[in-house]
Amino acid sequence: MPQAQKEYGYTPIKITVIFTAFVTLYIGLTVTYFDIKKQELLQVMPASKLIGSVPSEQQEQETDPAKPFQPSSAQAQISSDETIESLEVSEKVKKSKDLIPWNLLLVNQDNHIADNFNPKLTTLYNGLKVDSRAIGQLKALLKDAHNAGYPVKVCSAYRSAGKQRELYEDKISRLMEQGFDRSQAENEAAKEVAPPKTSEHSLGLAVDIVSIKYQTLDEEQGDRPEMKWVKEHCADYGFILRYPPNKSNITHVIYEPWHFRYVGINAAREIMERGITLEEYLQENFEF
Ligand SMILES: [Zn+2]
């Protein structure tokens, strides 16, 4: 019966399909085997054995927060508590920097905002504008803080690159009146006012939040109970404290207890729980 022969015969296509299936199964089993072996190894081996190949300098860095930021160390740092997590981080496939989504865009002294950056904005109040995709969460944060007995307000939000330039130039002029020359004044000004194209406020995703009862932008702001509430809960609304204390070596911005940045809830929770910066979070996930 030619029909039956055709049905059950090993045609080249069928042989290829069967061969592919065997290869796939073999690879699958091998991967699973090594995965199980790795897990066993992690459970029984002390962390010191696992980090044999990690240079001692990187181990030291973990205990010395004063050392300058080295991106590669984020993958290599391994402590007994974090062994599994750190290994997973190092195995993470980093995506191209071009794939960073809108909510994670990085703007700092090395990563300038594009000239034609033009976010869709919605007015919050008093003419303050915020990216339309983040304003709902911001409003919820402000409302819930108020309802919890910690009233706060936004005192600064979106600033165009032009407005940022104005603020920066104003600061420079004032410093030059005090006797600084232009380049000294530029350096000094940059410590307090972000130079044009380097301010997150131009993204429309950054806001300065202060206690209604205390509206000065200084470190004391962070000690206010209202701001402690905001810091504790901001991640649930997708915001992070963008310039935490002791991270200036990474952010190149002084501690700003009032400056919050929208990054989305998942990233915000990870960043705030781990006490890392947006720079560190992005370094772990994207090629820089
Ligand atoms: Zn700010």
Image (cartoon, helix red, strand yellow):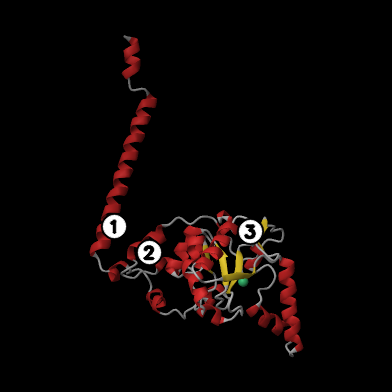
Residue at disc 1, CB closer than 8 Å to ligand 1: no
Q: Is residue 221 above or below residue 23?
A: below
Q: Is residue 180 above or below residue 142?
A: below
Residue occupying the point 52% across, 67% down = 145
Horizontal and vertical percent for residue 259? Answer: 58, 71
- Horizontal side of 194 relative to 62 (left or right) equals right
Task: Specify few, some or many for label 1: CA neighbours under 10 Å numbering under 14, 14-19, or 20 or more.
Answer: few
Horizontal and vertical percent for residue 282? Answer: 51, 62
| CB contact under 8 Å: marks 1 and 2 | no
Residue, disc 1: 38
Mark 3 → mark 2, Cα distance in angstroms = 34 Å
Horizontal and vertical percent for residue 15? Answer: 35, 28
Helix, strand or loop under label 3: strand
Mark 1 → mark 3, Cα distance in angstroms = 45 Å
Closer mark to the observer between disc 1 and disc 2: 2
Horizontal and vertical percent for residue 140? Answer: 54, 60
Closer mark to the observer between disc 3 and disc 2: 3
Residue occupying the point 40% across, 75% down = 62
Q: Is residue 120 or residue 77 the one in the foreground?
A: 120
The numbered disc on residue 86 is 2
Q: Could you tell me the amino acid type at mark 2? A: Ser
Q: Is residue 189 or residue 259 the one in the foreground?
A: 259
Mark 1 → mark 2, Cα distance in angstroms = 13 Å
Q: Earlier in the sequence, mark 1 or mark 2?
A: 1
Q: Earlier in the sequence, mark 1 or mark 3?
A: 1
Q: Could you tell me the amino acid type at mark 1? A: Lys
Q: Earlier in the sequence, mark 3 or mark 2?
A: 2
Ligand 1 falls in quadrant: bottom right
Q: Where, by quadrant of the figure, is residue 157 drawn?
A: bottom right
Residue, disc 3: 131
